[in-house]
Amino acid sequence: MARILFVLAHQDDEIAVASRIRFHVARGDTLRCVYLTNGASRVHAAVRNVESLTVLERLGVRDVAFHDIDDGALPERMPAALRLLEREEADEVVTLAYEGGHQDHDAAHLVAAVFAKQRGVPCREMPLYNGDGTVGPLFRVMHPIGDGWTSRRIAKREKLANALLCRFYRSQRMTWLGLMPLLLVAPARELTRDADLARASSRPHPGRLFYERRFRYPYDRFAPLAQSFLREAARD
């Protein structure tokens, strides 16, 4: 029985890894979900915590930790986020893809991948949303960037069940009204890939990233923070 640690940025990011949670629950593994930010940019953290706890309980996860780094500020707090994981135990780490969708997602990816490397355990990444090949407010859901991905077919009923988890994120209704239709039309598959910190040396994809367009967070701000964090972690 393996210990699987899911390292996520915000409450509701668990929908990106729902199929992987179901897989490990069915296998009898021990699961723990850790959220690095409070998710409280528009709604109180306690509201969002309850929403994610509701979803996780339906998925079979009851071991959960919520941390209090400000929503949107995780790139600046990556060293502190790594320290929050110091007491965690894991045989495998699962996190969000490095894909340019949200700056906190990419920062959580780096924190999780560094933690896994320090512990000598594998780290798997999974996509949620990104702006690869799109413009303006457009984005793609569960869209893999680059190569090295493993695709696992899931039942259509599981894909539907995962998409319908959106109904529990009532505080994020407008966000999920945009995302849920794309989840419903996405292929019935799970995409995973070994995290590779070397990818953090460049943009996740060519062109403006979605977080630059949507959240006005420039990659030129993210990149030096990421490189500083990785250099510091390499010295430890």
Image (cartoon, rainbow, N blue to C red):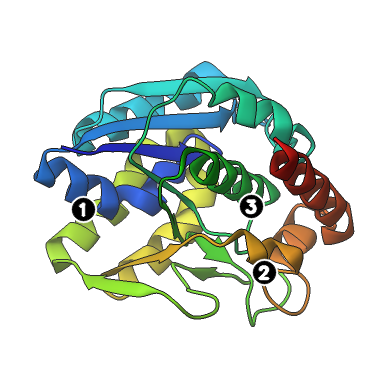
| Residue at which label 1 appears | 161
> Marks 2 and 1, Cα distance to the nearest angstrom?
29 Å
Q: Secondary structure at mark 2?
A: loop
Q: Which residue is mark 3?
A: 106
The amino acid type of the residue labelled 1 equals Ala
**Label 2: which residue?**
204
Q: Are marks 3 and 2 in contact (CB under 8 Å)?
A: yes
Horizontal and vertical percent position of residue 20: 28, 52
| Amino acid at dot 3 | Asp
Mark in the foreground, 2 or 1:
2
Does the CB distance between marks 2 and 1 fall below 8 Å? no
Q: Earlier in the sequence, mark 3 or mark 2?
A: 3
- In this view, 197 is above or below 209: above
SS under mark 1: helix
**x%, y% of residue 229?**
76, 43
The answer to whether 57 is drawn above or below residue 113 in the figure is above
The 10 Å Cα crowd at callout 1, few under 14, some 14 to 19, many 20 or more, is some
- Image point 74% across, 32% down: which residue? 77
Q: Quadrant of the N terminus?
A: top left
